[in-house]
Image (cartoon, rainbow, N blue to C red):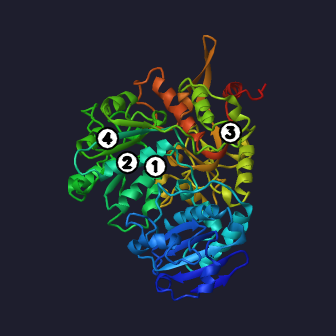
Amino acid sequence: MKMEILKNVNVYDFKVEELLNQNIDMNILDEISNISCVYIQYTSDLKKFYVGESNRYFESNSFSKGRFWEHIHESAEATGNINYNGFENIMMFTSKDLKGNADILETLLLKNLDVEFLSIKNRRLTNSRIEQKHTEDLSIEIENEVFPEIWNYLIERKFVKSELSDVAKNQLKYYSPYGKSIDDIEMQSAKKIIRLGEADSSYRNLIINGEPGTGKTFITTIAVMELINKRKKVAIIVNQTTIKKLYISFFKTFKDSEKPFIGSLANFHNKVNSGKIDIDEFSLIVVDEAHRLRQSEGKQQMLPSVYVLEKSKPDFTELDILLNYQKPLVLMYDKFQLIRDSDITINKFILKTSGFDSITLENQYRIKSTSNISPSNYTKGLRNILQLEESKYDVNIFKDGYDFKIVDSVKDLVVMINGRLNLGDKYKNSRLLSGYYKKWISKEKGQFEWTEDLYSVNLKWNTPNDKLGKKNWLEFTREKQAELQEVGCVHVVQGLDLDYAGVIIGKDIKISNIDGKDLVVADENNYFDSSGKPIKDTDIENIRLNEYLKRIYYILLTRGVYGTYVYFEDKDVERYFKKMMKLSTVS
């Protein structure tokens, strides 16, 4: 047994064998019996860990009681079982500050170890990602003194590698289940996905509907990880490069034999057809961003590596390919995030998924409200203002609760986001975004789309996905210190969480007053995403383009976790937004 006394914490490190043989100073054991503690059970090779808290890990006068003894004798299915997991050591932390607060320290350890172990090969928490109890309570002493001291100690012991400040910058923190409330619908969704993956006979299909920030990607990760622990093979189909890289980050430390397939439907289908993938090995297929599954309409690259449909079969879609595999299928879907003609239409999707089980996620987890106004009012309000749907919402969310501000210039927007970036590590994932209203000219070195002579600042479009390597745009700009130099378009941020978003609403949308009603409509002449425009003469009145552009701004305006700051190029659009939000008007 090893004991170390730190400034705020006492650390006891036991060998399980010593405890079982009672080869230990019983006076020390009496000292730490029946007191609040947090403990880590771990293997000597530092590959498996279990974190827990208890006020009776050891009990006085009875070695055959207490949480330790329960972990020895509990069932093999229990995540903290010492024998089944091969835990050979126990590290126990005690402190005067833990009384009534041990669960706070336990949660902080779980969340940060979870994020850290996704970056270190062959390190795994055995705690359940679904059933684990945790708290959202706060304690200044635990967060500012006890936990940092323990984390630094774990670095010394080589349990972890990263400084806490680096863990705080890691975007994977948003997808850890620890320290996050999981509502009954999310729990039901995750468990249903797991049951579908465990079924060995008849297959069923499931749609999980949810607006941005309701947990679709979060649910996918925790369910797939549970299925991997149950030795099931899963495919995660995602057509967006940014989200694909996010999933690769989740599973990069897993053994190759355990990793799910992660990639586009075209990639998966080509590998199945070539025999590189045996479809019979897969227990489940999950499609994230299923609204971006393709149909044969619109402008598309026709290379076999990315296109597996036939123009002569307009009703045959990537969804049909998935259905033909006859495997349990889960679709994460949001009808308000279709942004191109190549995305399968809502009507086709409904028709082809009739008979699917369906769950709708309702709680908003991305948007943080500091008042008692539900954050879902923000997303509902945006859909109403952008005229995507009629919905009731509390307009006060734009003034009280969520940090939403309209600024007077692009320069002001840069200053605001810079202010957030400089507030420590918490807001390092704050970025500038924009609709596609500027021609892309910055592919040439030294060129900018937003120039100092017009905007008092030089900004350029984001580095394209194919130039980012294995990193996503957030990681790339942080590494290049280009957070305030690049402006992200929808294609690099769809599906991502930002701390704060500075959004430029460009001249690609305008207000058209028809019969006394203000309508948000597309300005085709100021929209420069050539692949996003419908084919000429197929959308005469811009009906589809209107919807695509409103959805793009809906996506951009729902990236910021803690706040969104907005600059409007078109003052008529600004006046309309302010009127709908009941903010002060402009002249």
- Which amino acid type corresponds to the residue marked 4 in the rendered image? Asn
Task: Check if mark 3's residue and mark 2's residue have beta carbons within 8 Å.
Answer: no
Task: Check if mark 4's residue and mark 1's residue have beta carbons within 8 Å.
Answer: no
- For label 4, the residue is 205
Indicate the quadrant containing the C terminus: top left, top right, bottom left or bottom right: top right
Residue 193's tag is 2
- Which amino acid type corresponds to the residue marked 1 in the rendered image? Ile
Disc 2 to disc 4, C-alpha distance: 9 Å
Up-down relation of residue 374 to residue 39 (above or below)? above
Task: Check if mark 2's residue and mark 4's residue have beta carbons within 8 Å.
Answer: no
Of the pair 266 and 228, the residue shown nearer to us: 228
Indicate the quadrant containing the N terminus: top left, top right, bottom left or bottom right: bottom right
Which comes before the other along the chain, label 3 or label 1? 1
Q: Is residue 122 visible?
A: no
Residue 31: percent from left, percent from top: 65, 79
- Mark 2 neighbour class, 10 Å CA radius: few under 14, some 14 to 19, many 20 or more: many
Secondary structure of the residue carrying numbered label 1? helix
- Mark 4 neighbour class, 10 Å CA radius: few under 14, some 14 to 19, many 20 or more: many
Disc 3 to disc 1, C-alpha distance: 30 Å
Secondary structure of the residue carrying numbered label 2? helix
Disc 4 to disc 3, C-alpha distance: 40 Å
Q: Is residue 400 left or right of residue 379?
A: right
- For label 1, the residue is 219
Q: Is residue 98 visible?
A: yes
- For label 3, the residue is 566
Q: Which residue sits at x=60%, y=39%?
A: 557
Q: Which of the 4 image quadrants contains residue 151?
A: bottom right
- Which amino acid type corresponds to the residue marked 2 in the rendered image? Ile
